[in-house]
Structures are given as structure tokens and as C-alpha cells.
Image (spheres, grey):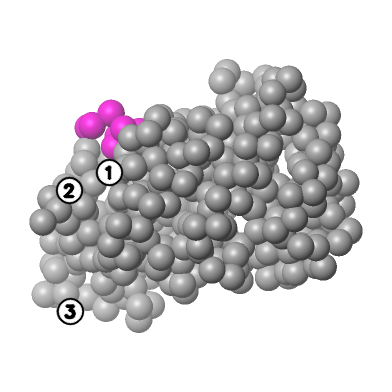
Amino acid sequence: MPAYHQMGHDSENLLWVEELSRYGGAILSPVNYGQNKITSQIEWAREQNDFETIFDPQLYVPNSERGCLREWSYFPDDVDTADPTSDAWWEELLEAIVSVCRSMAPTAVCSPAILPRAFSDDYYAQLVSVGNHLCTCLSHNGLRPIQTAVVGMPDLATSGRPMEVASILSRSKANHIYLVLMSQTEPRREFREVEEIKGAMRLIAALQATGLETTVGFCSSNLLLWKAAGASHCATGKFFDLRRFTRDRFEEPGGQGGGQLPYWFEESLMAFLRQSDVQRIMPMQLPNLSPSPNPFGAQILGQLRAEPERAWLALAWRQFMFWFADVENRLENGSVGAAALLRTADNNWRTLDDSDFIMEERRNDGGWIRPWRRALTEYQSPS
């Protein structure tokens, strides 16, 4: 099933790039855009064939910097003082969200969720309660409800916990889960905790097994793992804006768009590379598993040869997003497998190590590849 474009700061123009048409929809961001902007995004999407628009209210961190959220009529005046366990408060909020969405008419609406102090059974039960009330509110509006599930990855590392969480979430009346995996991993770094990764994969598989269509939000190259677990969709945006879901990402000042250095995504290493590394690695012709020709990659390489000083940040965003949708499609149709991609990357990192190749960034060392391989192997062959 197709990937989703996760909207972020200054990414509206990526929606209508013809070469990114493999995306099946967009998850809209009221943090980054006001209602008029998002309404125009929805209107554009209606003119496309089967392009979905999913509205995420994005109330995850009520006491954070809120970007454009205060411009939205559903944003609660008492958001900093309200009791998040109050059913009446949630019902009033849902009515306001539904009213706004009825006027904009996106394809689907995600249930609102606030980050908890602890990922307890009661928290997950409340998520489901809010989601079920949204289903009731949307039952006669022609809008599809989606159950938001914010899940702590450290919690999933405990044996049996993924199945417990899946059991609670499966009580949702919605048939679609928007899974937001919250990690303690530093933003812009890859997951490396094997047990947490396995727990997330087991949760995804369990949700899918109950018949719930599962979309994993805020993804990067880790979509290999989530697709191997059976995720229906994965969502991404400009790579340094949306690679990680943390509390901090909603506490950054509004209007800032994440890392502003250009990075090339290299499938043969499953890594993001700086310009100097791209120019040194490409002549090495590392083995790869025949990725589709990337038009933006070709533009970048041509520019680096002809005008190496010229900026290529916008092309970098497009190069990664093209790869993401393309590899999601290849994983979905079985033309390539996650295990083979990771094995190739592992071998290529060993080649670089043997030749004393030093990346420009110290922590860009491929150290996440073996934990990913181990997590995938142990998930597929549990002892």
C-alpha cells in the first residue's frame, strides 16, 4: 500500500511534484499551516486520483510551542490547565475538531492525543475511548475516523507488552490505526535498541492481525522494519524535519524547518551522507539491490560535477522522498526484502571500514545496521 507524505514546515510545494506522485496521501499539519492553507491542500488533493488527506489535530504537547495551532478554532483555551482525564473536556474538543473538519472535508480525521506521563493501560484505554467518540461524531459526516495510538517504545521492550497494548487498541471502533512511536533516541538518529525495535514490530504485526489497517507515522529508513512487520503504510516528510517523534520536536520555535544541511540518502548503506562523502563514495560503486532510477539523485550528481558550490537542499528533500515511496512500493510488491537490503548495507559498511573510509560526521558509522538486522532476525525467528 502506498506511503504517505507527512507534512512539515515549508513542505507544501512537495505535494505537487510530479515525480513524487507515488505517495497515496498526506497527513496534514495544523502546527505548520493555518486553516486556509490546509483547506487549499485538501482542495488540490480532491483533483488528484485517490489522493487521501488525513487531518491530525496535533495536540500532543499542550504546553509546548504551538506554531499555527492557536489560529485554529478547535484549539482549547484551557489547554494548559484542563484535566486530560475528563470525558467532558474531550467531548467538547472532539465536537470542535469535527466542526472544523466538516468544513474542510479531508478524507479522514485522526483522534487527538496528548502525550502521557506514563504509558499505562489507562492511558491506552483513554486513547481508545476518545477515538471511539470520534467515530460516533463522524458517523454521519462522510469522514473516515482514524484511531491515533501514541506508544512508548521503551514500554514495548518488556516481554508480552506489545500484545497487551494491541489488545487494548483493538477495542477501537475505527478500522485504521495511526501509530506514533515515541522514543528516547536523540532526534535525527536511528533507533538502536533491539528489544524496543522488536516490540514495535510485534505491536504492528498484532494490530494488523486484528484487521486494523496500520499507518506508522514519522518514519525514515526504519520503514524497512515496519513494513517487514506488516504495516499497511508508512509516512515521512523532509528527512530532518520528521525523522523522529519526540516531545522536543513540538517544543521548537514555530517556523523553523529542522536541519538545513543537504543530505543524500544512500540505499546501499541505509544512511544519510554529506556532500563530501557522496563525492568520495560514488566512485567506489558499492553493491546495491537495483533501486529504481532516482531523478533527483541524477540532478544532484550532475550539479555536484558542474557546480559543486551550488546549494542542493531542496533536491535533497526530493531525493529522499522519492526513495522512500519507491522502496515502500518495492517492499510491498516483494521485489526486494528488508533482510536483503540490510545485509547489503552491512557488507558495504564493512568494506568502508576495511578501507579506512572516514565519514565527515563522527556518528555516521552504520552502527544501527546490525541492531536492525538482529531485531529483524529475532522477530522473524523467535526463540
Name the residue beneath numbered marker 3. 356
* Magenta span: 328-335
User: Residue sitting at 62 percent across and 37 percent down?
Assistant: 132
Q: Is residue 196 left or right of residue 83?
A: left
Q: Is 184 left, or right, of 32 in this rendering?
A: left
Three-letter amino acid code of the residue under disc 3:
Asp
**Where is mark 2, residue-wise?**
380
Q: Is residue 55 left or right of residue 274?
A: right
> Percent position (x, y) of residue 179?
49, 48
Q: Position of residue 154 (x, y in %)?
A: 40, 68
- Which of the pair 43/356 is nearer the observer? 43
How far is disc 1 from disc 2 in space, using C-alphas? Answer: 9 Å
N-terminal-most mark, 3 or 2: 3
Q: Which mark is in front, 1 or 3? A: 1
On-image quarter of the C terminus: bottom left
Residue at label 1?
228
Residue at the (74%, 22%) spot, across then down: 141
The residue type indicated by label 2 comes to Gln
